[in-house]
Image (spheres, rainbow, N blue to C red):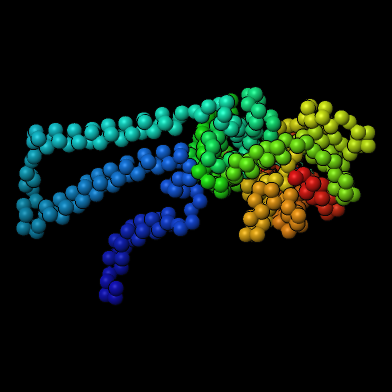
Amino acid sequence: MSGQSPKRLLTLAPALAALMVFAAACSAKAPQTTLKPKGPKAETINNLINPIFAVAAVVFVLILGGALFVAIKFRAKDDDDFDAFPEQVHGNFKLEIGWTILPAVILGLVGMLTVVTIFDLARKPDPKTAIQVEVYGQQWWWEYRYDVNHDGKYDEIITANDLVIPAGKEISLHIKARDVIHSWWAPALNGKKDAVPGRTHPLTIQADKPGEYIGQCTEFCGLSHAEMRIKVVAITDQEFTSWTIEQQKPFANPTAEAAVRGWSAFAGQCTTCHRINAMTDPGSAKNPVDAAKIYKYRSVVNQVSGAAPNLTHFMSRDMFAGGKFNLRKNTPACNKLGYDWAKTKDGIKDCLNRTDLEAWLRNSPAQKAMKPGAVPSTMSRGMPNFNLTEDQIDDLVAFLTTLK
Ligand SMILES: [Cu+2]
């Protein structure tokens, strides 16, 4: 390049910038790409993207190639008469009809394919057989409520962060939001759908194979929007059936000393927001109540704001705090244990991400954006800092690890 003027380099700058942007979009490992569908709905979308992209690419090359060709071939030469008009082609009937009809045909085709796809995607699965899940956008995490017995009420299982589904089955999602607009998108499984307060938006997803499908909230929803992640965990049909049974089991009183102390602390400080199905406070454990009856009424001491994750089976999750932190350590050995990692013999001992869980209890606003020092009210979002002591944190962790 020596001897080239800096001006020459400058003219290359836009091309280099474009190349950089292009390169930044390349990745071998891109779990959030929409171009690698992992289920029939995403496949349908991909089948629309590909032909339209091909048509667009041909149009792009022809038009820009033509423009470049004309610009180079017919550019003014030094001895040209600069005042003369170029040859006028206005009124060329064949050409004008041609370039009106061809785009109309192309757009008509694109429109037809699009409409067919939209109707295809809007087809809802049979409500009596498809798994029904209400997706509830909160600041800043997703709640998932399952209508297991198809009675129209989404109250059998309430969980957060990980959406557990059986592979190979259609899942009917009913997307809602508590107070602001979010958008739910797991690109490998279907397109995105806004979650709007006061409305219910349907979306059907299906994963071909067991696995994890990553996504995130795609509508700016406040301070922690970027930390509002989505993880769909697809398991086999059989695993899913046992998962639903486990998830519907009510709270079981812990017995170990530290866990009982943590239980007490939890009943005192945490139940204004968090719900644990059928949890009584430790005092009433000495005075046993009919567990079946409690289960029926779901919770006894819990006053519930509905604005915090249900923790009944907290240890069955992979992630916590809107998917920002791993609850199960992200190591190959721990990941291999799958969704019921905590139930395996040394699951809690070897695979609990104690560091981040303790840090969360120590000062959650510092871990995820809520205005630091904000005093919780009915309007506050996120979990406040309770200034717990290290002993209290140990007890609470001991208690939380019993919620399998
Ligand atoms: Cu959001």
Q: In the figure, is residue 185 to the left or right of 246?
A: left
The image shows residue 276 at horizontal and vertical percentages of 77, 37
Residue found 18% across the figure and 49% down from its top: 66
Q: Is residue 232 visible?
A: no
Residue found 57% across the figure and 26% down from its top: 128
Which residue occupies the extreme front position in the image? 238
Say which quarter of the image contains residue 242.
Answer: top right
Residue found 43% across the figure and 41% down from its top: 43
Q: Is residue 18 visible?
A: yes
Exactly how many numbered labels are in the figure?
0
Say which quarter of the image contains residue 231.
Answer: top right
**Quadrant occupied by the C terminus:** top right
Q: In the figure, is residue 290 to the left or right of 41?
A: right
Residue found 49% across the figure and 56% down from its top: 29
Say which quarter of the image contains residue 251.
Answer: top right
Which residue occupies the extreme right position in the image? 286
In the foreground, 19 or 322: 322
Residue 86 to residue 129: above or below: below
The image shows residue 270 at horizontal and vertical percentages of 79, 40
In the foreground, 123 or 174: 123
Q: In the figure, is residue 279 to the left or right of 161?
A: right
Q: In the figure, is residue 79 to the left or right of 205?
A: left
The image shows residue 248 at horizontal and vertical percentages of 72, 35
**Quadrant occupied by the N terminus:** bottom left
